[in-house]
Image (cartoon, helix red, strand yellow):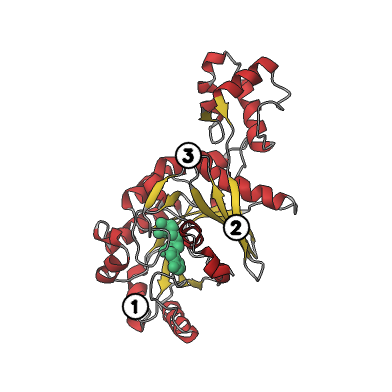
Amino acid sequence: MENIFGLTIQEIDKRCHELQMPSYRSKQIADWIYHKSANSFEGMNNLPKDLRIALAAQFSILKAECIKQWDSTDGVTTKFLLRFFDGVTVETVLMRQPYGNSVCISTQAGCAMGCAFCASTLHGVTRNLTTGEMLAEVFWVNDYLHIKNQKVDTMVLMGSGEPMMNYDNVLGFLRLIHEKYCLNFGYRNITISTSGVIPGIKRLEKEDLPITLSISLHAANDNLRSELMPINKKYPIHDVIAAGKAYSETTRRRVTYEYILIHDVNDTDKDAYDLANLLRGQMANVNLIPINPVRERNWKRPPKERVGEFLNILEKMHIPTTVRREMGTDIQAACGQLRNQYECGIEREFFD
Ligand code: SAH
């Protein structure tokens, strides 16, 4: 049975062709699903009863269920472990930022990219998430915030997975959530983060949507980057940066380069100068992320002074730079860490 949650009005229309339904009915159905958060066809009381029965025979309305929730002690971050119809789980994170509620969405269950510092990729990729499943992540958090009369304001595609390896579903999701009959979500409030999959960046550039692009760089030379991020062997650093530059020129939006700081690995003065030189002349800014230590690796955060010096060099070289606020480290908020602990049954060790 097909899941209707995640279909556009046009897709509903097409699928319902055999039901000989006038097209305004598709709008009514979308209104029930996306505005009124209906979970069954039964209560759609502006549709004829026969149609409701026919729809129920053809479609399901499946979202996600939450099987676990963690709150950071500072109250800033809440992490949800969501489960889809086939038992696959993903993490979705709510971050209460000064500028509003931001949600961090997973685009795949697991990840195939193999980055050395990332917990999401330790068990590979299970499968791509569908348009409806990514939308269900946002709906879950919206429903959770609804009780407090709040909603999701901004969204980052920075959870588990590589969005560019699930391009069609991701774009379908972004276009759907932007629709007025769905959540009317502004493209300017969306950031999509990639490990540097150039064909995906090029495709997104052609869409010409005002979405912010974030590129995970994490090293300023090919040798180190290839070690940390195997994708660099396919798409080396200078090509990735050229793709970022083209994206910012087409969309007139500043590209963010993410740079995890790992002590004694990529945090020297030379690394900072090399990074600044790479980005010079580009509409770009850098987001420094002191690494969230992952249980399976032996890497450490640089001391605060080192982070400060790294930042100073970039600023001196006129690269706008921010340091990511530490959020939710007490709930292991780095990508994929909670899901791994849950799936490996070692969660108790961490939280008891
Ligand atoms: N695949 C995409 C999006 C998911 S990763 C990408 O690579 O951008 C989202 C961000 O979290 C990336 O910048 C990633 O490098 C970062 N990240 C992964 N593991 C981390 C860790 N242990 N500490 C801090 N940031 C981490």
**Is the CB of the residue bearing disc 2 within 8 angstroms of ligand 1?**
no
Tell me which residue sits at (73%, 24%) in the image.
45
Assess disc 2: are there few (<14), some (14-19) or many (≥20) residues with their C-alpha within 10 Å of its C-alpha.
Answer: many
> At numbered mark 2, what does the secondary structure look like: helix, strand or loop?
strand
Q: Quadrant of ligand 1?
A: bottom left
Nearer the camera: disc 2 or disc 1: 1
From the viewer's perspective, is residue 339 above or below residue 279?
Answer: above
**Residue labelled with disc 3:** 172
Assess disc 1: are there few (<14), some (14-19) or many (≥20) residues with their C-alpha within 10 Å of its C-alpha.
Answer: some
Q: Viewed as shown, does residue 92 lie left or right of 238?
A: right
Where is residue 229, by image quadrant?
A: bottom left
Are dots 2 and 1 in contact, CB under 8 Å?
no
In the rendered structure, which disc, 2 or 1, sits on the residue that comes first in sequence? 2
Q: Position of residue 350 (x, y in %)?
A: 54, 69
Assess disc 3: are there few (<14), some (14-19) or many (≥20) residues with their C-alpha within 10 Å of its C-alpha.
Answer: some
User: What kind of residue is marked 1?
Assistant: Val
In the rendered structure, which disc, 2 or 3, sits on the residue that comes first in sequence? 2
Q: Viewed as shown, does residue 101 lie left or right of 338?
A: right
User: What kind of residue is marked 2?
Assistant: Ser
> At numbered mark 3, what does the secondary structure look like: helix, strand or loop?
helix
Which numbered tag is attached to residue 102? 2
Where is residue 278, by image quadrant?
A: bottom left
User: What kind of residue is marked 3?
Assistant: Gly
From the viewer's perspective, is residue 171 above or below residue 2?
Answer: below
Cα distance between the residues tagged 3 and 1: 38 Å
> At numbered mark 1, what does the secondary structure look like: helix, strand or loop?
loop
**Residue labelled with disc 1:** 265
